[in-house]
Amino acid sequence: MNIFLETDRLVLRAFTEADVDHLLALDNDRHVMRFINGGRPTSREMIRAQTLPRLLHDYPCFGTRGYWAAEEKDTGAFLGWFEFRPLDDHSPAVVELGYRLNKAAWGSGYATEGSRALIREGFSELGVERVIANTMTVNAGSRRVMDKAGLSFLRNFAGDWPDAIEGSEHGEVEYELTRTKWEQLT
């Protein structure tokens, strides 16, 4: 197992082809996908052809991946994934933070714990200067995680939704944390 990062309760590891069933279950939970695609199902073919290649992509500026499978440290249970991906393959300056966890993992602090660990790694080891995160304005749970992870509200914006889903009419929000602000907080 290619472990990228460990926290008190999490292991963040590289995805493999063997994760298709985990991803299929995650992306077919209508609660998990509510703010992503309105809860519509995802096919195994879509996971294999689109999702998994994105999760397996290596970023030259990091020399590693930008998406990490999250497992519970004590049990090895698959919880979901974290994104900490450079917006430019060749520059670590700005990264996007994201997370998608099984509903059973919600409310346990895993999203905040994993996000804080990735932010710390990014600013202290990977040369990151700015972390951004986006979600739908109405996604209060994800916004709470961003706040708890140290990010601050930056702006509202209108997302480009090919198919409108419930809540998309309220737009999206962007949060950010700069290296300077992180250093002040730590």
Image: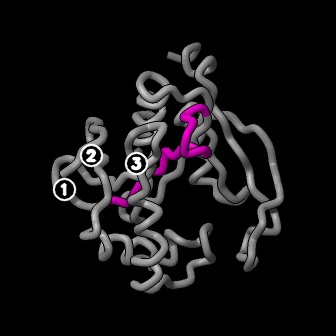
For the record, the magenta segment spans 79-93
For the residue marked with disc 2, what is the amino acid?
Val
Q: Earlier in the sequence, mark 3 or mark 1?
A: 3
Residue hosting label 2: 11
Residue 111, image x and y in percent?
Answer: 44, 47
In the picture shown, does residue 7 fall above or below 127? below
Q: Can see residue 67?
A: yes
What residue is drawn where x is 45% and y is 29%?
Answer: 126
- Residue 64 within the magenta-colored segment of the rendering: no
In the picture shown, does residue 135 fall above or below 89? below
Residue hosting label 1: 76
User: Along the horizontal axis of the image, is 22 left or right of 33?
Assistant: left
For the residue marked with disc 3, what is the amino acid?
Arg
Residue 87: name its quadrant: top right
Instruction: Give 102 or 15, whichever is nearer the viewer.
Output: 15
Instruction: Give 55 or 136, whichever is nearer the viewer.
Output: 55
Marks 1 and 2: CB-CB under 8 Å?
Answer: yes
User: Along the horizontal axis of the image, is 29 left or right of 35?
Assistant: left
